[in-house]
């Protein structure tokens, strides 16, 4: 059942090209002229009227939501708040009459996410669920649903669900931007072309596995590690750190690279492993200057950037090269090496990769 892989997690990491392809299937017009999201019931008037979006989720799904905020704001210019469900449900959020809520849940059964969703519906807010389980509570109760076609995810650590959630959010962002006139046909075409290439990109990044396996040896004895990045790379850093904590049991922190010097830099000492994510050309110089700061304190840095950008080799100890894509689409390729790193670190430490201690696949308690 593990298809020849030693663990479900490794199998699911390798299923990502297919999962992303399946999530795009039928939703991108063959001539790249637009997005079809037949399953959502928004008409043009509603799509144009939305003036605020609240994205609610937990854990890895929340991290996907952070990427969603970045792309929806960039392309559709709708203000987005992303919030953790267990926080959101206990405060008194401000809705406009045209607020749309998006809940993201792989299982569709996470108690806090469902409670937040019910709370919003009771206030008359329209809720769209992005879920991987067709018959789940979230799918049944939401006003609209986008299914992620990742297939069953067995490993507790989420991998292919995350990349398909991001794929669904890209489709939604492009759809909103197109209908609202923020993107013209050429802009839609360019984005959809890049989106259609993502499965191929994911396939290519899987080839970094041997490099990550060897780098993961540094984590056998490590006690602390940091993931840094700016913008959308910070969202990916949060996911990389969670994955590592959850299955390798090594303390990991994600930091917005520019924020390090406001306190956390004190923890960077000789030999501390740092992952520096630099996939965004606009932010590249700034991120590199933060990487220089951690190098100066003795950190051992693995950098990630787009292929062809050899410049990073001057600053870091090792580089992972990611295939080129539009900056906004970088997270799908960038997260895969981090999933592999967490996986190989957990294996090297002899942990139960698919069933980490203290955790459940579906969190149905509050
Ligand atoms: C981490 C992980 C969790 C889930 C979270 C939400 O690898 O899997 O953080 O993302 O428990 O679960 P869903 O998406 O089912 O609501």
Image (cartoon, rainbow, N blue to C red):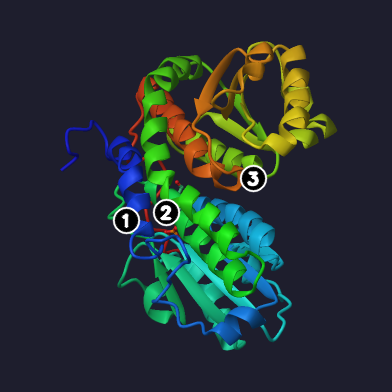
Residue 366 visible in the snapshot: no
Q: Is residue 54 above or below residue 228?
A: below
Q: Residue at x 19, y 39 (%)?
A: 2
Q: Is 132 rendered above or below residue 179?
A: above
Q: Position of residue 172 (x, y in %)?
A: 52, 66
Quadrant (top left, top right, bottom left, bottom right) of the N terminus: top left
Label ID, residue 206: none
Q: Which mark is residue 164?
A: 2
Q: How far apart are the alpha carbons under marks 3 and 2?
A: 16 Å
Q: Residue 179: where, in percent of width, then height?
A: 58, 74
* Label 1 Cα crowd, 10 Å radius (few <14 / some 14-19 / many 20+): some
What is the secondary structure assignment of the residue under circle 2?
A: helix
| Residue at the right extreme of this rendering | 262
Q: Which residue is mark 3?
A: 232
Mark 3 vs mark 1, foreground winner is 1
Q: Which residue is mark 1?
A: 22
Labelled pair 3, 2 in contact (Cβ < 8 Å): no
Residue 113 location (% of width, % of height): 51, 67
Task: State the CA–CA distance, disc 1 to disc 2.
Answer: 9 Å
Q: Answer yes or no: do the residues labelled 1 and 2 have beta carbons within 8 Å?
A: yes
- Of the image marks 1 and 2, the number of the one nearer the N terminus: 1
User: Callout 3: few (<14), some (14-19), or many (20+) C-alpha neighbours within 10 Å?
Assistant: many
Quarter of the displayed picture in which ligand 1 can be seen: bottom left
Crowd class of label 2 (few under 14; some 14 to 19; many from 20; radius 10 Å): many
């Amino acid at each position: 059942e593990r298809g020849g892989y030693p663990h479900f997690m490794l199998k699911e990491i390798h299923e990502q090209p297919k999962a992303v392809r399946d999530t795009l299937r039928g939703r991108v017009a063959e001539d790249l002229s637009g997005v079809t999201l037949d399953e959502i019931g928004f008409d043009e008037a509603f799509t144009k009227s939305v003036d605020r979006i609240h994205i609610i989720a937990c854990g890895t799904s929340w991290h996907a939501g952070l990427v969603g905020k970045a792309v929806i704001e960039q392309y559709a210019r709708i203000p987005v708040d992303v919030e953790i469900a267990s926080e959101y449900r206990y405060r008194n959020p401000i809705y406009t009459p045209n607020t749309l809520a998006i809940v993201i849940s792989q299982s569709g059964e996470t108690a806090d996410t469902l409670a937040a969703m019910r709370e919003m519906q009771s206030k008359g807010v329209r809720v769209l669920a992005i879920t991987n389980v067709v018959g789940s509570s979230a799918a049944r109760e939401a006003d609209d649903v986008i299914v992620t076609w990742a297939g069953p995810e067995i490993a507790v650590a989420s991998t292919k669900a995350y990349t398909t959630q991001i794929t669904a959010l890209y489709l939604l962002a492009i759809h909103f931007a197109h209908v609202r006139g923020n993107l013209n046909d050429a802009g839609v075409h360019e984005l959809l072309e890049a989106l259609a290439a993502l499965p191929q990109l994911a396939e290519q990044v899987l080839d970094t596995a041997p490099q990550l396996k060897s780098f993961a040896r540094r984590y056998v004895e490590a006690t602390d590690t940091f993931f840094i990045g700016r913008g959308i790379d910070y969202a990916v850093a949060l996911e990389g750190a969670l994955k590592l904590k959850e299955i390798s049991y090594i303390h990991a922190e994600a930091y917005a690279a520019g924020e390090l010097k406001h306190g956390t830099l004190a923890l960077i000492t000789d030999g501390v492993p740092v992952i520096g994510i630099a996939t965004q050309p606009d932010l590249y110089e700034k991120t590199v200057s933060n990487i220089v700061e951690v190098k100066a304190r003795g950190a051992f840095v693995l950098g990630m950037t787009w292929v062809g950008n050899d410049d990073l080799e001057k600053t870091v100890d090792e580089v992972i090269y990611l295939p080129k894509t539009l900056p906004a689409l970088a997270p799908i390729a960038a997260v895969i090496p981090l999933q592999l790193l967490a996986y190989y670190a957990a294996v090297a430490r002899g942990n139960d990769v698919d069933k980490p201690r203290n955790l459940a696949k579906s969190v149905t308690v509050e």
